[in-house]
Image (cartoon, grey):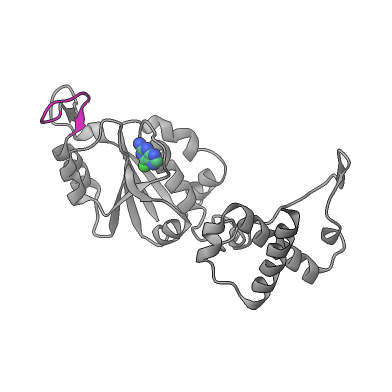
Amino acid sequence: MKIKIVTLFKEMFIPFLETSIIKRAINNKLVEVELVDLRTYSNDKHNHVDDTPYGGGSGMVIRVDVVKRALDDIKSSASKVILTTPRGITYNQQIANKLSKEEEIIILCGHYEGFDERVLDYVDYEISIGDYVLTGGEIAAMTICDSIIRLLKDVIKEESYKDDSFQTGLLEYPQYTRPYIYDDKKVPDVLVNGNHEEIRKYRLYESLKLTYLRRKDLLDKYSLNKEEEELLKKIERETLQKK
Ligand code: 6GU
């Protein structure tokens, strides 16, 4: 996969691209990431990419002609163009899974100033990463990149993400490692007994319980199998008793 990021702040991406799993994925050629400076596509001598808004008001607006020149230069027939904006659809794992199957994506980093509305004619998706406002789309672009890159073949072992919160539709079960006792708290017995069937059942139960207690909205979308239905009934009974 190829990811092109169009931004006025390329430097923000350097530590992100040069650390840990993302760095390794790039070095192993599992993904190619290109940083594109929008300013290169300005056509005035001061390298302006924005101008004052029609109708007046404070702030500046990114010009559509500058963005279009950038896209014309870097777009291929396979590219999907994403604009990061708080107005977009809220990003989630399902969108990450879908985007991870694309050959090439271009991410246009939004800006607190905003883009000329006509930019939308050249964009496939408008994406927000949640209901809060960032000063620019760079952190959103990194979030999107990170979540996509980790899903690409050979970047991490599939076992590492198949139980992820949201990948299954349930929140992930709790994990423990050494020490066995810490501050008088022991690791649950079932995890040290070596009975794999019991461990599987315990983890499923804990996953369901966390999701039930914290994210009922996820559970409503999830289709339960027979075993999960039984476990959930038990969880419902137990929480009612506690109240
Ligand atoms: Cl994509 N951009 C900005 N500026 N703020 C956001 C966002 C994006 N997603 C959530 N807040």
Observer-nearest of 224 and 71: 224
What's the residue at 42%, 45% (across, down)?
A: 129
Question: Ligand 1 appears in which quadrant?
Answer: top left
What's the residue at 56%, 58% (across, down)?
A: 216
Tell me if 140 is positioned left or right of 199 in this view.
left
What's the residue at 30%, 38% (across, down)?
A: 110
Q: Is residue 28 a member of the stretch shown in magenta?
A: no
- Residue 120, x across and y down, in percent: 21, 48
Quarter the N terminus occupies: bottom left
Observer-nearest of 229 and 148: 229
Which of the 4 image quarters holds residue 60?
top left
- Residue 91, x across and y down, in percent: 41, 51
Observer-nearest of 43 and 58: 58
Tell me if 164 is positioned left or right of 98 in this view.
right
What's the residue at 51%, 50% (across, down)?
A: 25
- Residue 144, x across and y down, in percent: 43, 47
How many marks the image carries: the answer is: 0
Q: Is residue 59 a member of the stretch shown in magenta?
A: yes
Is any atom of residue 137 visible in this view? no
Q: Which residues are magenta?
A: 53-62
**Taking 22 as reference, is 10 above or below it?**
above
